[in-house]
Amino acid sequence: MALWQECVQPGESWSLNLKRGNRLRLHDLEGAANVAALFYNRECPTERYNMPDTLKAQHTAHLTAGHILYSDMGRVLCSITADSCGWHDPLCGFTHRSQDNLLTEASRNGLGMRDLGPTVNFFSKVVVAGDGGMRFVEGHSRPGSFVELRAEMNLLVILDTGQHPLDPNPRHAAGSVRIEVLAGDPPTEDDLCRIQCPENSRGFINTERYFL
Amino acid sequence: MIVDQVVEAGTYWIHEVRRGERLRIIDLRGNQAVDTLFFSATNTEERYSATGTMVAQRNIYLTTGTTLVSNYGNPMLTIVDDTCGRHDTLAGACAQESNQVRYAIEKRHMHACRNSFLLAIVDPKWKLEKRDITANINFFMNVPVTEDGGLRFEDGISEPLKYVELRAAMAVICLISNCPQLNNPCNAYNPTPVQVQIRAAE
């Protein structure tokens, strides 16, 4: 049962508070969505999503269920608790058009240009070849695909539904997205994300200490 | 030669590089990681963008011909010479907190690149703060990505005296932390000094 939900049209932006324990579900309605997302500690926004720390702790260059998003402070901002899509891109950032939207959302929350770092691009897939070449996989996400995030800290989330920077589609538009916020339970001892790797267990220890 | 200086492992170096000048970083003993950020010298809100640079060249590795792109979409520097072959921009800088996650909660005390970055920008003349410390370049570091989306930390491909040289397309501030990491095979658990040189515009 959603606490609230909202439909975000292609090329639009949104920002929201997500309380520790609550879940954010993103639905790709037409199978054409890209959601560029940034995450901040609501109480101290200089703590924010850190792409390199997230990738190296989990030895991954893509994100899916079982992965967590690390802040620059060694804590878990949120966990990916469910994912029907299998791959979300953390490598490519956002287009100039999306940057204006993200900057607007950042500004209305007291943040600015300096606070925009690498995003997670939900529903988009970019594979890297042996020579380092990057290839955007068209048609990766299906209509009705969804991904669910569980907040492990109190978060400010900034979203933009603009086109992925490597998407060759000349329409310059992506698909619309339904965002849903649901109540949830804190992670159990045998939580999928916590036990994914020893690094993540330590990330959860750091996070739980913050809330003691 | 405008600048010619050795930067010991575990220390930082911050310096302006003017338009047209060339910055050379020499891996004196091999397999060192040189964590590097660039900012526009006239507006530090404009800075090196790892994602923008990778997307512009559609490749994750930096080497000769790579143009480093800013968060405003402008060319900042171009790599004009590279005897190492490729450099990383995905693995970021070590921090005390990420060391806790990656190695052990008890390893918080160990010196880390982010400390060096933060110390380097204490002087307000640089107009930089913590939130300006974003995804950096790791010169001489080898972090391959696999086709199935994995990320590996491999032994370095650099060797003693390999170097990379960049020509500035705008006036930039170069911020370097010469990595002190003792827990990672990328530098064979042995951080070593590097040399930085700035040559005048031709």
Image (cartoon, coloured by chain):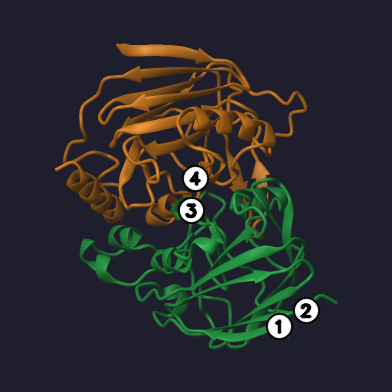
First along the sequence among labels 3 and 2: 3
- Whether residues under marks 1 and 2 lie with C-beta atoms below 8 angstroms apart, the answer is yes
In three-dimensional space, the C-alpha distance between marks 4 and 3, rounded to whole angstroms, equals: 7 Å
In three-dimensional space, the C-alpha distance between marks 1 and 2, rounded to whole angstroms, equals: 6 Å
Q: Of the residues shown, which amino acid type is indicated by label 2?
A: Ala
Chain letter of disc 1 in the image: B
First along the sequence among labels 3 and 1: 1
Q: Which residue is mark 4?
A: A62
In three-dimensional space, the C-alpha distance between marks 4 and 2, rounded to whole angstroms, equals: 42 Å
Marks 4 and 2 on same chain? no
Tell me if A28 is positioned left or right of B65 in this view: left
Describe the element under mark 4 as helix, strand or loop. loop
Q: Which chain shows up in orange?
A: A
Q: Which residue is mark 2?
A: B200
Q: Residue at x 33, y 13 (%)?
A: A2
Describe the element under mark 3 as helix, strand or loop. loop
Marks 1 and 2 on same chain? yes
In three-dimensional space, the C-alpha distance between marks 1 and 4, rounded to whole angstroms, equals: 42 Å
Q: Of the residues shown, which amino acid type is indicated by label 3?
A: Gly
Q: Residue at x 45, y 23 (%)?
A: A26
Marks 3 and 1 on same chain? yes
Give the vertical position of A192 relative to B109 (above or below). Answer: above
Describe the element under mark 1 as helix, strand or loop. loop
